[in-house]
Image (cartoon, rainbow, N blue to C red):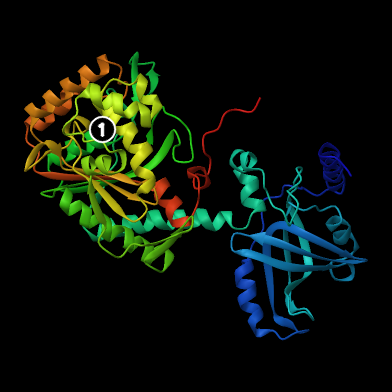
Amino acid sequence: MTDEHELVKIRKEKLKKIREQGIDPYALHFKRTHSSKSVHECAKKVSVGEVLEDLEVAVIGRIITVREHGKSCFANIRDDSGDIQIYVKSNAVGEKAYDLFKLIDIGDFIGVKGKIFKTRTGENTILVSKLSVFSKSLQTLPEKWSGLKDIELKYRRRYVDLIANKDIKPLFKLRSHIIGSMRKFLEGKKFLEVETPMMQQIPGGAMAKPFVTHHNTLDMDLYLRIAPELYLKRLIVGGFEKIYEINRNFRNEGISTRHNPEFTMLELYQAFADYEDLMRLTEEMFYTLAEECLCKTSLEYQGHNIELKKEWKRLSFVEAIKKYAKIDLESVSDKELKNSAKHLVPETRKMNSFREIADALFKRVVIPNLIEPTFIIDYPERMCPLAKKKRDNKNLTERFQPYICGIELGNAYSELNDPMEQKERFLDQIKDRKIGDEEAHLMDEDFITALEYGMPPTGGLGIGIDRLVMLFTNSPSVRDVILFPQLKPQK
């Protein structure tokens, strides 16, 4: 068996021979008249064994397979629309062109011109009369039938994954369709798309560790945003009533099947709305996206059949902890909570703040049970520095998070718009930082000033697009739906 290094050497020799014939193996211009898909459409007029004489097509694509038969070859070329078979015969293209084709390898880009015919087996095929080479591939592709199986290599060399595995490109096209449908849905609701800074002087809007960068001219540290929330709320203060941003966020945290350090989110804000309005909006958006992108309102995820066009279950955060962890957050002290939690979630032994411990407990004990579409609602006030207190219980906040199949898909509040209370909440966060909660919010004085100008009652919602695409594509890992997920460098 020839090793990979030797195969590359052989391909380089072929490249040299092509150049020696005075042919540019990386030529630029080719006037394509048809895609592979449109050739198949044209071939519907052709019967088995017949040639479509009144049409010449010009197609360009990557060679995927080659099958030699003496002085002729069948091959398949692939473009963005699919595959088409070609038939190269020496007496049809000429000896020189046929010799050139013999220097072609799987992976090369070629352009062909010719007429369409249907083989005796009914295969739509182009009878090549002219061919050109447009990119000589020096690396070998994975074996045809097995595709690219190495998971690490799939993520690290996504370009090879896209070439080798036919089901990968449709997945990412579906991702694009989902985001486009999301925009269409929101624009139908009269939301305006906006953009806010990715580099911020004070990271805020979420509980997360930021990435730090440095601006040389200003000689100051900046932070890659962990969320656009505080800037979007400033726009609500400024007079916009319905806004959204589809944005990139950056959080300096762990990597897993659910987390990538940079990720895509939808974040929207609606004036004169509360979290009840946004729960209804979330339900409608999810089943509308399913209808638009999957042509149904249900989906399959890892063995679970999920119906989206129905009212979602609701369960309060406190009741969820009581149900699955047997701990009553409303009656235990912080010390008692820590003592009870450490037996269920050992890593809480190193945590000191109520927020950290309750959050870790919830993630480990509750989330795996949230299979059916569920809103976890009414979080303790100590966990939600940006959310409005619940109208009938000041110890809780009007916050919800949507869950399906054990996946957290977003976060939403009736937004806190009292500047004095917001400042007090930030000060409480500073206390949590002092006892070791590195994800607690920093004080943002300018945001307090913005609230002092008056922010109307507002509902805010964030949806994690990567996780949503995971759900809609039945993908077990978030890395499957991010074209280039973050990985450790190879040694």
Residue 398 drawn at (x, y percent): 16, 42
Residue 70, image quadrant: bottom right
Residue 158 drawn at (x, y percent): 60, 44
Q: Examine the rendered structure and indicate whether residue 59 appears above or below residue 330.
A: below
Left or right: residue 471 versus residue 414 is: right
Asked if residue 465 shows in the view, the reply is yes
Crowd rating for badge 1 (residues with CA inside 10 Å; few <14, some 14–19, many 20+): some
- 362 or 243, nearer to the observer: 362
Residue beneath the point at 73% across and 82% down: 53
Residue 459 drawn at (x, y percent): 17, 46
Residue 387, image quadrant: top left
- 490 or 68, nearer to the observer: 490
Q: Examine the rendered structure and indicate whether residue 142 appears above or below residue 437.
A: below
Left or right: residue 130 versus residue 158 is: right
Residue 75 drawn at (x, y percent): 78, 64
Left or right: residue 74 versus residue 449 is: right
Residue beneath the point at 65% across and 52% down: 163
Quadrant of image for the N terminus: top right
- 271 or 100, nearer to the observer: 271
Residue that carries the numbered disc 1 in the rendered image? 205
Q: Which amino acid does label 1 sit on?
A: Gly
